[in-house]
């Protein structure tokens, strides 16, 4: 990763196709390997809650409540991005999807990278295809184009992360996933808006 290579790594949701956030060429290679449109944002994976202010600005109180209760875990929060997040990661948007995965291999990898570094990743599959939940499920076409596959066993959740945006006046569900919407609403003591399925959100 530090050398600008791409890897496949495990999380509790699905396996991810990753690059170091500080290597733009490696980030752009993700889109080529996956066959993914470049305006579809990638999720930033990092290890420590204390780094949230490095990657995002103006984190609202309700977002902090979800962070306190649900991170590490299958929840991605979309927040205003900081200057440390390049636009090639966010699809040209001023917002960024962030999460801390709940997987010992992923956390060990992210901590080994050091402070103020992160791995950006979508699921490790061709765009529009089924996401892999084990190393053996990774498509041969994908695996031939990366430098390493970290095998962390089967993903215990096996479903993509829930994505909640805090970039509008009210929190909005952009994608259902590993954490039920009802659990989030109970934590926040409010209803969550659900994005129109025709709208394009981060994936």
Image (tube, rainbow, N blue to C red):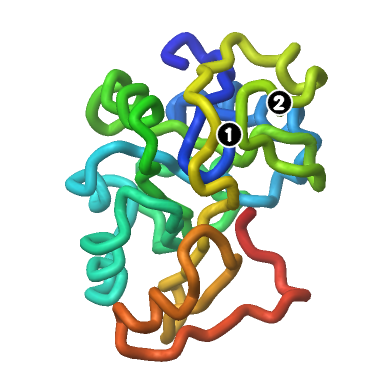
Res 25 → quadrant = top right
Q: Nearer the viewer, residue 29 or 151?
A: 151
Q: Using a 10 Å C-alpha cutoff, classify the residue at mark 1 as few (fewer than 14 neighbours), some (14 to 19) or many (20 or more).
A: many
Res 176 → quadrant = bottom right
Side of 196 relative to 41 (left or right): right
- Label 2 residue SS: loop
Q: Nearer the viewer, residue 10 or 110?
A: 10
Image point 58% across, 46% down: which residue?
158
Residue 156 is situated, as x and y percent measured from the top left of the image, at 49, 42
Q: Nearer the viewer, residue 58 or 140?
A: 140
Image point 53% across, 85% down: which residue?
193
Res 121 → quadrant = top right
Side of 150 relative to 201 (left or right): left
Side of 128 relative to 113 (left or right): right
Check the image and name the residue furthest to the bottom.
190
Residue 97 is situated, as x and y percent measured from the top left of the image, at 47, 54
**Above or below for 45 versus 179:** above
**Above or below for 43 versus 79:** above
Sequence-wise first label, 2 or 1: 1
Residue 151 is situated, as x and y percent measured from the top left of the image, at 52, 19
- Label 1 residue SS: loop
Contact flag, marks 2 and 1 (Cβ < 8 Å)? yes
Side of 133 relative to 143 (left or right): left
User: Could you give the CA–CA distance between mark 2 and mark 1, rounded to whole angstroms?
Assistant: 8 Å
Task: Kindly identify which residue carries mark 1.
Answer: 15
Which quadrant does the C terminus fall into? Answer: bottom right
Task: Kindly identify which residue carries mark 2.
Answer: 138
**Above or below for 147 versus 172:** above
Image point 61% across, 57% down: which residue?
202
Residue 93 is situated, as x and y percent measured from the top left of the image, at 56, 57
């Amino acid at each position: 990763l530090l050398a600008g290579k791409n890897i496949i790594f495990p999380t509790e949701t699905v396996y991810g196709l990753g690059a170091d956030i500080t290597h733009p060429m490696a980030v752009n290679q993700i889109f080529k390997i996956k066959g993914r449109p470049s305006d579809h944002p990638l999720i930033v994976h990092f290890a420590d809650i204390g780094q949230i202010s490095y990657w995002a600005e103006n984190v609202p109180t309700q977002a902090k409540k979800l962070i306190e209760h649900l991170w590490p875990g299958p929840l991605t929060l979309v927040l205003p991005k900081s200057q440390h997040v390049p636009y090639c990661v966010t699809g040209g948007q001023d917002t960024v999807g962030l999460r801390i995965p709940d997987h010992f291999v992923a956390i060990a990898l992210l901590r080994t990278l050091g402070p103020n570094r992160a791995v950006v990743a979508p699921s490790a599959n061709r765009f529009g295809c089924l996401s892999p939940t084990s190393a053996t499920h990774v498509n041969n076409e994908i695996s031939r184009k990366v430098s390493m596959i970290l095998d962390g066993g089967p993903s215990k959740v096996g479903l993509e992360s829930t994505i909640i945006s805090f970039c509008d006046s009210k929190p909005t569900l952009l994608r259902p996933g590993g954490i039920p919407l009802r659990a989030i609403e109970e934590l926040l003591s409010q209803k969550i808006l659900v994005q129109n399925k025709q709208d394009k959100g981060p994936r």
